[in-house]
Image (cartoon, coloured by chain):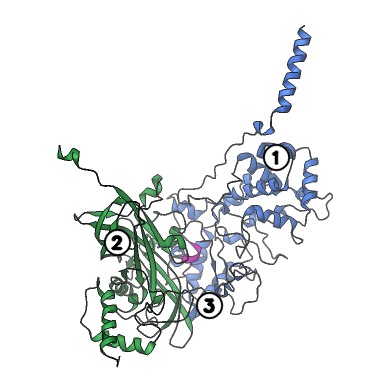
Amino acid sequence: MRLGAIITIGVLFLALASCKPEQDHYTPTPYDLGQPSYFPTKTNIPEDNPMTEEGVALGQKLFHDPRLSGRDGTDGIRSCSSCHHQENNFEYGAPTNTHHAMLPLINLAWNRTGLGWNGGVATLEDMVLAAVTSPVEINADTNKVVKYLQKTTDYPELFEKAFGSREITFVNVERAIAQFVRSLVSSNSKFDRYLRGEEELTEDELKGYELFCTEDGADCFHCHGGGGLALMTTNLFYNNGLDDEFNDPEDRAAVTGSHWDRGAYKAPTLRNIAVSSPYMHDGRFTTLDEVIDFYSEGVKDSENINPLMHHVMDGGVQLTDLEKAQLKAFLNTLTDEHFLNNPDYSKPNQ
Amino acid sequence: MLAACTKPKENAEIELNIGYELNGQLLATDTLCYVNEAGNRFLITEIQWFLSDIELLDQDGEWHKLRQRDATDSIALLTEHIFYIDTDLLESQTLRGKAIPVGHYTALRFTFGLDENDNRSGLFNDPPESEMFWPDVLGGGYHYMKLNGRFADGEGRLAPLAIHLGIGQNEDLTEFYQNYFIVELPIDFTVAENAENQLDLTMVIDNWFRNPHIIDFNEIGSHIMQNQSAQRLLNGNGKDVFRIGKPAENENDTIMGKDNSLAEKFRKAMQKAAPMPHFWRWDNVKERFQDLKNSNSSI
């Protein structure tokens, strides 16, 4: 009698469990970006991919896992972090064989102008697909990636926690990595602490900030923000006078079709700029000194140059050696060691 | 007893449509086809600016403020009386206001830019408004306007045109000056229930550069954020930049059409004319020009 009852209850339990949709076990925890009060309030997060603790954790694992290439062995397997190095602002830190130099993966939850130097990639989810399949990046077959991950002992459970299903799809791979990349927030540089009243800048750093923020100084702020635009970029596109002839088929004009956008590229954030070499869309400069020299004396005029390059007719903003040093001192205050070493962004323990 | 019988006034939503006119034509951006009073050829790429404290005067002498219709949460309510307008953002050209009482209105007034009560750093955290920030070292707050473009300089090169208006400073950056101004225009506008209730406001861009101060872009064309004397000249010119009505759309609607010689003769004729109150200047110009055309074929 007792055995019969136990068997009946057990059968009933199994029957109920098998009828229950997997989504009932799906209780993800909303993710808090934890940004400071002076950051934008409006994020750019797709409605069909809200950030969750589980999704971000899965994305962190995938981002750093060479199994994302869907291949065995040590020959040619790559993860996102093979090239996106945390210590280099999630850039490579050296020239690459991609068409353009890398842009930092940083504070992208607030980016609203597309991705890449020309803004041609609409979402981070699309960017994941492009990177995974690009012959010069991970060079993977998405079907093989999914089959490979499905066979692992760890991923099906993590996908279930993040998306409510043990069945892995590449769409969910995209979503998880995109969630992780959106979680990469830099807001604890010395300049942030200055903005929050927690730390003072030195006299040279302050003078550099004044140069950064004045038209009669280095005139950086219109495109690269400052205290009033703490992402340190507008995320908009400018021809900054690097060249006076334009042959790049992947400049901003490739997206807008406008002649006026020839030679225009996204203004990158200057957060962690000291560790983001090489500089410019084609990585032509390797040091901050070269970049500052360019804006001081090397700006080239063309009909495409952005009107905000106010000093183009003088060839640049004409800084003295002292002013260049002060400007560099300020730029160094944008380095966020907490971000560059944050274990929440590093390869997780397996 | 009387109060109980008085029917409360109904409210209705209104919209203020923004337009731009230059050289008597509808503004075409990125087109090098304009000439200012100083003879500079120029183009305009974009105009980004703030209007705030927009109010309409009813027949009882009461002002009614235009508040952003979409402002509902507590943060947005703080800035519901401030409108950001951008030639690149079509939706920003229509200022959608919450309901105001139905009835007849006789004047419109607004602040060009932001006054000292509003113009504080940190007011906007989100783009596009936050992209208008005016560095604290220069007085803080936000640009009133960024008018960007290019002009042909004295050597025939295309130089940056960047008319950026905001708080001014002395040379040492120790004293700051408010450069916003208030504009008041007469209107004949009825707000009715179940009606579109649309009012048109046009920025006559030419007037930034010609009345009363002729602006030569070779002298005041770019990096003027730290040039308070330039800010004051443009402040003086700005007060008759706005008129009620739609911008001219083609040469049939314009004052000057595309006949530059006629336009030049007309300008000279107008320079001899007595100054007019700025509220009425534009409409009177139209009327006078028509009179001149009709009465004197030599013009």
- Look at chain B in the picture and name its colour: green
> Residue placed at 69% from the left, 31% from the top?
A21
Res. B247 image quadrant: bottom left
Residue under the point 43% across and 60% down:
B92
Q: Is residue A182 above or below residue A222?
A: above
Q: Which class describes the residues within 10 Å of circle 2: few (<14), some (14-19), or many (20+)? A: some
Element at badge 2?
strand
Q: Where is residue B238 drawn, in percent x and y?
A: 31, 71
- The three-letter amino acid code for the residue at tag 3 is Glu
Q: Is residue A155 above or below residue B208?
A: above
* Residue at the left extreme, as displayed: B1
Q: Which mark is residue B110?
A: 2
Magenta-drawn segment: A214-225
Q: Is residue A324 above or below residue A66?
A: below
Image location of residue A175, percent across then percent down = 66, 47
Report which colour depicts chain A. blue
Quarter of the image with the N terminus of chain A in it = top right
Q: Is residue B164 left or right of residue A180?
A: left
Is residue B151 visible to the viewer in this orientation of the structure? yes
Tag 3 residue: A297
